[in-house]
Image (cartoon, rainbow, N blue to C red):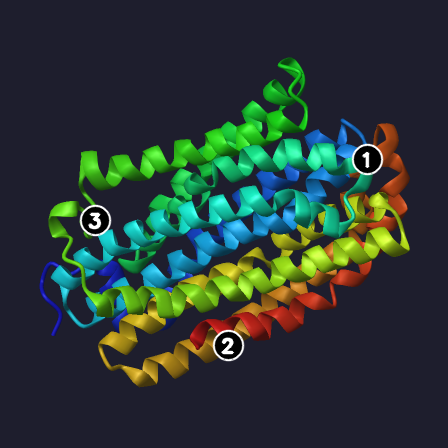
């Protein structure tokens, strides 16, 4: 039996996994959509600087995906371990795992930052950044130097998801997104910082969201899990539980970043930097389209882990099949909407200056990429189960 003070979120994951999946997915969908939208707004503001600036930021996109991939992956590892321990009614171990996840993220972010600082220019040159490399490095250096904030925020999100709370991270991400939307035009145009301004706005927004999360954990102190140093007692098995899920999840997302880099290089070779602008901008829009699928998969990790810890194996099969059905239905709806409104969507990013010349290609990209959505719906749910 669960202890009386166990959070309602974990109780729901064990007693009604379908309902838990939906209740956890909705705030995740909202928060991830908001994040995706402010990345799109970044692109919309940068497009005002011209197609080369948009392409330069696009060349950095695969590297940005590496940072986000590690953050999301390690956050998933944290959510898995915490839900597993709470499902097994071991609050003390869950508290210890919470501070383990923060320390692991800090170490990982330091290593990744140093590696990317050294490899940034070689990677951009290998991708064929060419005349846009100045824009790419101006944007990229700032983001890399602030990467600890991007990665750490996901560890803190993972702690909240582990205890079945996806609502608070939603509030934090919405606040961060609104701040980013306000700062973008100020830094890019009013302060005349160009693409550097877009990068600074992104990092400032990431810092802001961490401050909100830290306030909840350490000042207000009303979260169920307590990631305090006083609860830290290094345990190899806890670290392994976080890493054995976090690293494969990160590698899966790194695989996406690798292919994005390869595609950018191929597009430069067979086309031009305009093609990279089309691809990177189009993929930002695809990110919005696939957000509900990622959200369902992310919520699925916590639901499955809680039931795994409680040895409720039948619930794992039930919630996996349910997640597949919901994901496929959503993917088909999003695919139809994207195809119908492809021209209208592309006009937002190709309506002024030299960016106009990419409008037709961007519309074509959006019309065809919809084939990808239903296949991803099947893949995400099943991959996240494993």
Residue plotted at (64% across, 56% down): 289
Which numbered circle lies on residue 382? 2
**Residue in the foreground of this view, choosing between 71 and 167:** 71
**Residue in the foreground of this view, choosing between 253 and 172:** 253
Which numbered circle lies on residue 51? 1
Q: Report whether 29 appears left or right of 275.
A: left
**Sequence-first tag of 1 and 3:** 1
Residue 104, x across and y down, in percent = 32, 54
Considering every residue shown, the one lying at the far bottom of the view is 314
**Sequence-first tag of 1 and 2:** 1
Residue 166, x across and y down, in percent = 36, 52
- Residue contact between numbered discs 1 and 3, judged by CB atoms under 8 Å: no
Q: Is residue 57 visible?
A: yes
Residue plotted at (60% across, 49% down): 63
Q: What's the distance in space between the residues labelled 1 and 3, CA to CA?
A: 45 Å
Q: What's the distance in space between the residues labelled 1 and 2, CA to CA?
A: 38 Å
CA neighbours of label 2 inside 10 A, class few (<14), some (14 to 19), many (20+): some
Number of dots carrying numbers: 3
Residue where numbered disc 3 is placed: 227
Which quarter of the rendering shows the N terminus?
bottom left
Residue 101, x across and y down, in percent = 30, 55
**Residue in the foreground of this view, choosing between 2 and 140:** 140
The picture quadrant where one finds residue 267 is bottom right
């Amino acid at each position: 039996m669960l202890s009386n003070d166990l959070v309602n979120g974990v109780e729901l994951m064990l007693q009604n996994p379908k309902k838990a999946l939906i209740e956890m997915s909705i705030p995740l969908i909202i928060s991830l959509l908001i994040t995706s939208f402010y990345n799109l707004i970044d692109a919309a503001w940068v497009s005002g600087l011209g197609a080369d600036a948009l392409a330069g930021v696009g060349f950095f996109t695969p590297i940005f995906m590496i940072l986000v991939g590690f953050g999301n992956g390690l956050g998933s590892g944290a959510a898995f371990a915490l839900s597993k321990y709470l499902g097994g009614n071991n609050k003390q171990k869950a508290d210890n795992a919470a501070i383990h996840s923060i320390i692991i993220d800090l170490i990982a972010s330091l290593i990744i930052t140093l590696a990317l600082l050294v490899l940034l220019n070689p990677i951009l040159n290998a991708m064929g950044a060419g005349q846009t490399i100045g824009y790419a490095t101006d944007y990229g250096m700032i983001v890399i130097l602030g990467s600890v904030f991007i990665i750490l925020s996901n560890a803190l999100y993972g702690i909240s998801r582990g205890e079945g709370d996806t609502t608070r991270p939603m509030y934090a991400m919405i606040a961060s997104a609104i701040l980013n939307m306000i700062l973008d035009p100020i830094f890019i145009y009013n302060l005349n910082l160009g693409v550097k301004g877009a990068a600074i706005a992104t990092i400032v927004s990431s810092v802001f969201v961490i401050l909100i999360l830290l306030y909840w954990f350490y000042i207000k102190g009303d979260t169920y899990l307590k990631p305090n140093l006083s609860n830290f007692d290094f345990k190899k098995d806890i670290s392994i539980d976080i890493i054995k899920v976090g690293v494969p999840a990160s590698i899966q997302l790194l695989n996406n970043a690798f292919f994005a880099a390869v595609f950018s290089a191929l597009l430069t070779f067979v086309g031009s930097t305009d093609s990279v602008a089309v691809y990177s901008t189009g993929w930002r829009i695809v990110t919005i389209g696939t957000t509900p699928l990622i959200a369902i998969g992310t919520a699925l990790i916590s639901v499955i882990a809680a039931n795994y810890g409680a040895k409720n194996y039948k619930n794992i099969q039930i919630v996996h099949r349910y997640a597949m059905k919901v994901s496929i239905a959503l993917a088909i709806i999003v695919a139809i909407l994207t195809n119908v409104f492809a021209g209208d969507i592309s006009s937002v990013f190709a309506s002024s200056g030299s960016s106009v010349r990419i409008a037709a290609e961007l519309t074509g990209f959006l019309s065809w990429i919809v084939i990808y959505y239903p296949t991803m719906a099947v893949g995400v749910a099943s991959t996240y189960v494993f």
